[in-house]
C-alpha cells in the first residue's frame, strides 16, 4: 500500500472544487500538497452546548445538544466540540483508502480535527469533528484549510466497498449528524 503523490491525487481522486496549493496571504493554506490534499472547512457549524441538558446518544441523537452557526468563522467554547463540513466533495476510488490529520496551525492552538477513514468508493462532503482542548475560546475560519487528507492505494482491490455495503453516510451533501440504522420493518 503506497501513499499517493500530488500528481496521482490530481489524476485519481475526484475533488470538487479542486485547488492547487499556493501561498495565500493571511489564509490558512489549502489545496493539493506533495502527498495530500488540505481541505477547507465550510460555513456551517454545529457547536455542542449544555444549555438544554441533552444527553449525547449515537442511537438517538438529540438536536438540542448543539447550536447552529453559519458564517465566515466560528468560535468554539473552551473544552468544547463542533461538527463542520468540508467545502470539497470527494469520490474515493475502489482501490483507495483515505485518512485525515489536522493541520499544524490549528493543532498548535489546541484544536484537534477528527475524521473517520474515507473508505473505498465513499462519496460526499466530509463531516469533521473539531475539538477545542484549551481552556480558552478558539476561532475557526471558514473557507480556509483545517485538515489534510492522505490517500493510500491498496495493492489489491477490496471485495466489498463502502458503496457495495450501502454505507449509511454515502452521498452526504454536507454536515451529517450521527445516526444508527434501525431494524427493517416487516
Image (cartoon, grey):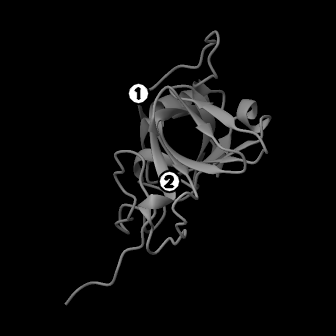
* Residue denoted by label 1: 17
Total numbered labels: 2
Q: Pick the residue in front: 77 or 88.
A: 77
Mark 2 in CB contact with mark 1 (< 8 angstroms): no
Give neighbour class at mark 1: few <14, some 14-19, many 20+ (Cα, 10 Å): few
Of the two numbered discs 2 and 1 in the rendering, the one whose residue sits closer to the viewer: 2
Say if 10 sits above or below 174 in the image: above
Say if 23 sits above or below 111 in the image: above
Q: At x 49% / y 22%, what residue is drawn?
A: 19
Identify the secondary structure beneath mark 2. strand
Q: Pick the residue in front: 134 or 165.
A: 134
Q: x, y (%) of residue 110?
A: 77, 41
* Residue denoted by label 2: 66
User: Is 110 on the left-hand or right-hand side of 60?
Assistant: right
Q: Pick the residue in front: 97 or 135.
A: 135
Q: At x 34% / y 45%, what residue is drawn?
A: 173
Say if 186 sits above or below 134 in the image: below
Q: At x 54% / y 70%, what residue is drawn?
A: 55
Circle nearer the N terminus (2, 1): 1
Amino acid at each position: 500500500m503506497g501513499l499517493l503523490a500530488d500528481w496521482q491525487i490530481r489524476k485519481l481522486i475526484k475533488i470538487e472544487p479542486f485547488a492547487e496549493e499556493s501561498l495565500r496571504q493571511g489564509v490558512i493554506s489549502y489545496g493539493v500538497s506533495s502527498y495530500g490534499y488540505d481541505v477547507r472547512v465550510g460555513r456551517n457549524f454545529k457547536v455542542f452546548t449544555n444549555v438544554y441538558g441533552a444527553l449525547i446518544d449515537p442511537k438517538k441523537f438529540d438536536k438540542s445538544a448543539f447550536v447552529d452557526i453559519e458564517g465566515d468563522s466560528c468560535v468554539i467554547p473552551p473544552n468544547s466540540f463542533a461538527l463542520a463540513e468540508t467545502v470539497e466533495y470527494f469520490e474515493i476510488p475502489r482501490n483507495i483508502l483515505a485518512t485525515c490529520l489536522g493541520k499544524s496551525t490549528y493543532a498548535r492552538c489546541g484544536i484537534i480535527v477528527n475524521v473517520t477513514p474515507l473508505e473505498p468508493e465513499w462519496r460526499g462532503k466530509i463531516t469533521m469533528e473539531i475539538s477545542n482542548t484549551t481552556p480558552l475560546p478558539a476561532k475557526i475560519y471558514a473557507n480556509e484549510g483545517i485538515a489534510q487528507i492522505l490517500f493510500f492505494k491498496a495493492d489489491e482491490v477490496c471485495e466489498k466497498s463502502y458503496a457495495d455495503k450501502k454505507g449509511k453516510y454515502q452521498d452526504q451533501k454536507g454536515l451529517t449528524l450521527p445516526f444508527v440504522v434501525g431494524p427493517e420493518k416487516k
